[in-house]
Image (spheres, helix red, strand yellow):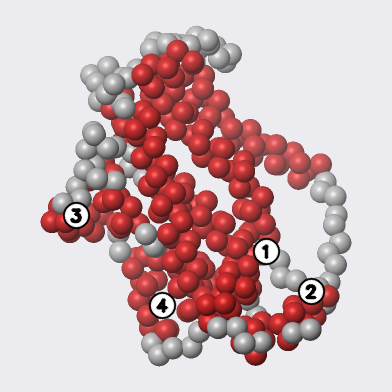
Amino acid sequence: MTALSTLIKRKSGGASAVTTMRPSWFVYAALAIVLIASMFPFYWSFLIASGDRFTVNDPNLSWWPGGNFLANAATVINNPAVNFWKALSNSIIVSTAVSVSTVVLSTLAGYAFAKLRFKGSGPLLIAVVATMAVPVQLGIVPLYILMQRFGWTGNIGAVIIPGLVTAFGVFWMTQYIQQSLPTELIEAARVDGCSMIRTFWHVGLPAARPAAAMLFLFTFVTSWNNFMWPYIVLDQQSPTLPVSLSILQANYFVDYSLVLAGVLLATVPLLLLFMFAGRQLVSGIMQGAVKG
């Protein structure tokens, strides 16, 4: 048996059992109230989206949805000015590329800052974290000038490249790996003859998986809902979904039933993502809060 496997078995065998307790009725009541309060904006949006253009101003608005949601959704999708399917594909490409690159690069940087010894690691990490104090709005003008000189304006690459890695992702993964990955496991892997890359792949990456899943979800949602920078750098030939749906509010009279139908359509991919990746999110929260 290798030193690494022996150490992992010793640590897993020494974990104490946690006694589970059934929550009281007060906890379920509080969770039900939070759930209802969280779902109310979605229900209100669906209520308006299932009506007509006069529903939002109706003083006798019924709390029962109407029957126009599918028609309003079809109007949004088939609107040539919105270019829905092109915008949807661009949002999927941008959000997926940004999320994957942020997770990969942040995990590598976090592992280096947390477990590798190199000169200047402390000041460099402080410099990375300090960039989060700079408002995003201050970098828009020089970033736009840079994208214009590269000839990337109007291309989704201008949205992907600046978001390949974030300071928050590096800080998040550094803190998580530093607290959840024992240095003894890395030393045992090096004793077994693992290189630095193999140690990261077989020891560091499995330990960082819950935090990486959380970072992927948060980055995907942030990139999906990003409006300001894509609105500035992209054109109507290659928009993202939030930029494309903003056209529905560009008229003199805004039809809020169509606007909210488009908003609900843009929310569906995020709901599907959380349905499939919710277990990883809960696992990341619990493993970050509970130590074995």
Give the CA separation, mark 3 to mark 4.
Answer: 27 Å
Q: Is residue 119 above or below residue 78?
A: below
Q: Amino acid at mark 1?
A: Gln
Residue to which mark 1 is pinned: 287
> In what quadrant of the picture does the N terminus appear?
bottom right
Mark 1 surroundings within 10 Å by alpha-carbon count, few (fewer than 14), some (14 through 19), many (20 or more): some
Give the CA separation, mark 1 to mark 2.
Answer: 14 Å
Residue 81 spot, x, y in % from top left? 27, 23
> In what quadrant of the picture does the C terminus appear?
bottom right
Q: Secondary structure at mark 2?
A: helix
Closer to the eye: label 3 or 1: 3
Q: Quadrant of residue 73?
A: top left
Q: Amino acid at mark 2?
A: Ser
Instruction: Give the mark nearest the N terminus, 3 or 1.
Output: 3
Instruction: Give the mark nearest the N terminus, 4 or 1.
Output: 4
Q: Secondary structure at mark 1?
A: helix
Q: Residue at x 52, y 77 (%)?
A: 197
Q: Secondary structure at mark 4?
A: helix
Q: Which numbered dot is residue 12?
A: 2
Instruction: Give the mark nearest the N terminus, 1 or 2.
Output: 2
Q: Amino acid at mark 4?
A: Leu
Give the CA separation, mark 3 to mark 1.
Answer: 40 Å
Q: Amino acid at mark 3?
A: Met
Q: Which numbered dot is residue 147?
A: 3
Q: Is residue 32 left or right of residue 71?
A: right
Residue to which mark 4 is pinned: 125
